[in-house]
Every structure is written in structure tokens, then in C-alpha cells.
Image: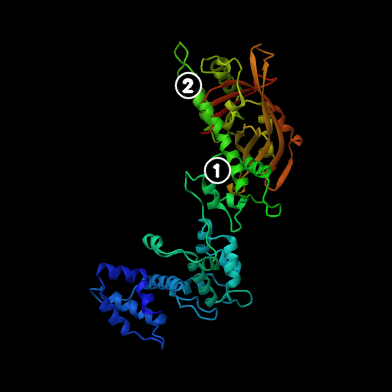
Amino acid sequence: MTKASLEKLKFIKELLSDGDLEKDELEEIWNGASKSGDEQINADSFVKIFRVIDELFEEEEEEPDVDAEAAAMAEIEAANAVVEETPDDNTKPPEDPELSTIFKSIANDQGLLTQEGLSEWEEVQSLKDDGLLGEDEFGIIWGKMPKTDEQLDLVGFLKFNQALDDLFDFEDEEEEEAKEPAPKAAAAAAPQSKGMVEEEGLSPAALFVALRDDDGLVGMPELKRWGELQEMISEGELMPLELENFFDEIVKSDKKSNKLAKNGFLALYDKIEALFEDDEVEEVASELQPTASEPQPTASETKEQLLATVASLNADEERLPCGLECNDSEQKYVQELVSKLEAEGTNEVRLRQGAIEMADLAGSWELLYSSSAAMAFNKGLSGLGGSIPNGSFAGLKMRLVASNYMCDMEYTERIKVVPDTASFDVTVNGSWDVRTSVSIFTGEPSVVLALLPNMVTYGPTSTRADHWKSLGPTNMLDLSYLDKDLRIMRGNTLTDSILVFKRIK
């Protein structure tokens, strides 16, 4: 390291700028250090300089801070990568006590480290989890390291860490702004880590630039870095199947790469935006709708009583949730509450005389209660909960999607298994529709929710839904009650079969 390189180190620059270290003091310390013929210091001389500077600020003589030395050594490696030429592959990197200790803890009995072992090192895992180190970048760095029997020794491990340091910029923000852009050839020499794109408010074109790969394209792997999109999926606002269908519908730049150019990405962006524009239009229309002359109904006491009763039933951990093991008197009481609620003024089905649209039902719902004899017999929707040893039904969620492009539905049934690590989900995918009719029992307008299951998937198993007879009783249901967060369905031919769903916010 040259003197100019030493002065560029962050902690040296801070000491000089704050006046804690004078230039003539640094000059004197430099002159006293051992140097090679070209007036450069090695790692040992740097450590000695560090200790001398450290002692200037010690009131009592103490042992040097090993962690501080290690941090300084990491900084000098990063600085060398910027201000000096990259050392030859045969050059041994500086020893680092901390890294040497880590290497011993993760190396095998032969004192070597495999690619798999290095990948499982918590530091590498942390970088991968944060999106700062991709699998391809890890593989490139591994491939360039010197190896013994395709494994790393200590020198190779230190070189690997040095290469990791080269991926990241250790300068502060002010220095980053002042720094001139690196030449293209230098920028291409080391792969850059690509993390999540979290900025909100980016234009579609700017978002494409932030996500695109080295070939200027965006595929499904790049879409996983779109933070807002992943948030939509995690919150249930966008189903993975919807995204895949949108992506498949758009013409790709190259069939082999299966990725989108700019125009294709903008088309995908518009498709996703359209899903939420419909919801916004509905909300605005609802706000502008004139109020009736008579007072609007307030929150129903019957509804609160129904929700409290169902919550009490589900709180009994000795029985299956959603009322599947209720006794006759409990079922009768819930039936009375539901019948009373259906007749109240909060019921959108009655207020609109059955003019319910698919957009009114679209969204995510959770089953609170069911008196379906089929579900009680099968101990759930799929029947897997009662057929698997130590397994039981643990809840059911429904996702209904309505757009100009598709009408997808998805059931997700949770199967609890002891031990809990073996628990799993059963997913039923398909389509849905809303049909208006007249109830054969009441003669009043009726809204029928028609479900057409397609595939049932659990674990590695995927089968056609027409093989699952247990799904039949829920495929045709009458909508008997609806408000902004509660939906009650009755069997199309068995009105005593009741299913109560609550909207998931």
C-alpha cells in the first residue's frame, strides 16, 4: 500500500479532517514504518501503523482492538481494489484473525471447504436472503477461486471474502456522489449485486430499467425483485397463477430466454394495474351514490351476536374449527341468527334485489362457520384432514378474482399435522361465475355462486378436481347475505347447509 492509498482510508480521512491527527504526525508514523523498495507497506506494516495511531488516543496502554484491526483490514482490502491494480491470483491475501477463526469452524476434517459448505455459511446466506448476492454471482466467484480437490483452503477462503468485498462499495454517501462513474470495462469486470427494487412511485419505464438483467430483459426471476409486486402476492391481492397467466399471454423478445423486452414489460404492468383500477372505480361510484331518504342501517346487533357466537365455537380447541363438530342445539341457534340477519336492511342481496356483480364478491375470504353435512362427514373440504394419521382440518380460505381477463378461484385448506412441521396446505384452483335466479324455496331473487374446480394440489401431488367428490356440495351455493365484510352462503338445494365467510382485509 502506498502513502496516498493509506490517506484515502475512511478512518484516516476522518481523523485528518477532524484535526485529531495532524499531517506531520501521519508523515512521521509513515516514515517509521518498514517499506519495500517501491515505498509501499505490507500488511504487517499497516497493522503497526494502525496500532501507533490507536495508541495516540489511549489514556492507558491497552491491548489493540482485534475487531478494529479486522475491520481496518477489511477496509484496506476494499480500498486496494479501488486505488490499486487487482493483485495477481497467486498473491496471498492478508491474514485476518477473525476470518481464520471462521474458516476453522466451517471447514471439514481435512481443513478444506466445499462449495456447499461455503454456501451454507451464515454470512453468505444473509447476503442471499437480503437479495445482495445472487446464486449466479456466488457461482462465478466460486469458479474463480484457487482450489484443492475442488475445495477451498484458508488462502482460497480469504480470496473469496476479498472478492465479496469487491462487490460492495465501502465509501460513504458523500464520497459516492462525488466519485466519477467507473469506465464500462471496469464495471463489467465484477458482477454487481442486484437487490429488491423497493422504490414506490417509479414510472413503468424506470421500473423496467431497475429490474432488467444484463441483457436488458425482464423475466420471472427479475419480477421477484419487484418489491411492490411481491407485496401484492404476499397480501393475497394478486395470485401467483394470475401473474403467470399475464406473463404467458405477452409476446416474448426471445422464445429461448422467455423474457420480456421493454414493450412486453409495459404491457404486463398495464395488466396488473387494470386489476386495481376496477376496484378504485367501484369505490368512487359507491361514494358518489346518493343516499336514500330514510336513515341508512347501522351496524347490526344480530351480526355482532353471530360473529361472537362463531368465535366462541372456534375457541374450543377440543373440536374442529368452523363449526364442523357443533351439536344440534348450537347449529339451530346459528341458523336462527343467520335467518334474522338475512332479513335485515344491511343485506345487500335484498337491497339490490339480487343485482350482485362479480366485483362485489371478488377478494379474499375466510370460512368462519359451516353446517354442511358433507364437510362435517369429510372433516373438512378435501377430506384429507380426517384420512391422514395425526391430521386434522385447521381452516379454509377462498380467493376470488374477477377481471376483464379471468375469473379464477382458489381454495386453500390448512391441514394440521402433529408434529406441526408436517402440516401442509391443500390448494384447489379453478374458475367461478355468478348467476341470477329465483329461489325454489322462497320465490325471491337468488344469486348463485357457481364454482368449477380444476386441480387439487398438496405437496408434490396434483390431481384433477373432478376426482374429489367432497368438493361437490360447495360448487353451487346461493348467496343469502352480503355486506362489506361478511358473506353467507346456503346450499343450492339444502338451505340448512350454511357457510359463513368473512372478508380478509
**Residue 238, how many percent across, how many down?**
58, 39
**Residue 3, how many percent across, how many down?**
36, 79
- The residue that disc 2 covers is 288
Sort mark 2 into few (<14), some (14-19) or many (20+) by Cα contacts within 10 Å. few
**Residue situated in front as seen by the camera: 474 or 17:** 17
* Mark before the other along the chain sequence, 2 or 1: 1
Which element type, helix, strand or loop, lies under badge 2? helix
Which element type, helix, strand or loop, lies under badge 1? helix
Task: Establish if 401 lies above or below 104.
Answer: above
The answer to which image quadrant residue 27 occupies is bottom left
Sort mark 1 into few (<14), some (14-19) or many (20+) by Cα contacts within 10 Å. few
What residue type is disc 2 on?
A: Leu
Task: Establish if 136 lies above or below 68.
Answer: above
Q: Residue furthest bottom?
A: 37
At 53% from the left edge and 40% from the top edge, which residue is drawn? 235
What residue type is disc 1 on?
A: Ser
Q: Residue furthest right?
A: 467
Can you see residue 209?
yes
**Residue 268, how many percent across, how many down?**
61, 43
| Eye-nearest disc, 2 or 1 | 2
The answer to which image quadrant residue 63 occupies is bottom left
At 60% from the left edge and 68% from the top edge, which residue is drawn? 115
- The residue that disc 1 covers is 234
